Amino acid sequence: MCLLHTRMGGEGIPPEVHDAFDEWLLVLDGELPLVVDNQWFTLSAGEYVVVPRGKTHHVPPGSVGTLLLVDINAPTA
């Protein structure tokens, strides 16, 4: 498992795919626009989403606040 605590200042994160792990994104404060396989979400403080391994996702510009990223490297069933 890998934890990353990051402060977003509106810059966004380009598209990425993680084939080896799921990624859990928790918004600690602020607001996070997120696109997972072309489906748009807007998460507010206290909300989270789990991005399954193999899914393309990105944060468009406009995300402002604190984000906790947890990469969950667990065996698949």
Image (cartoon, rainbow, N blue to C red):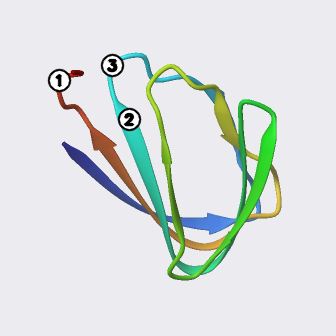
Q: Which residue is mark 2?
A: 22
> In the picture, which quadrant includes the N terminus?
top left
Residue sitting at x 38%, y 35%: 22
Q: Which quadrant of the figure has residue 17?
A: top right
The amino acid pointed to by label 1 is: Pro
The amino acid pointed to by label 3 is: Ala
Q: Is residue 36 above or below residue 20?
A: below
Q: Which residue is mark 1?
A: 75
Residue sitting at x 54%, y 73%: 47
Q: CA distance from mark 3 to mark 1?
A: 9 Å
| Foreground residue among 59 and 40 | 40
Please tell me how crowded label 3 is: few (under 14), some (14-19), or many (20+) other residues with Cα within 10 Å.
some
Residue sitting at x 24%, y 45%: 2
Please tell me how crowded label 1 is: few (under 14), some (14-19), or many (20+) other residues with Cα within 10 Å.
few
Q: Secondary structure at mark 2?
A: strand
Tell me: 29 left or right of 58: left
Q: Secondary structure at mark 1?
A: loop
> In the picture, which quadrant includes the C terminus?
top left
Q: Secondary structure at mark 3?
A: loop
The amino acid pointed to by label 2 is: Asp
- Residue 7, position in %: x, y? 53, 68
- Residue 29, position in %: x, y? 56, 83
Tell me: 40 left or right of 22: right
Q: Which residue is mark 3?
A: 20
Q: CA distance from mark 1 to mark 2?
A: 10 Å
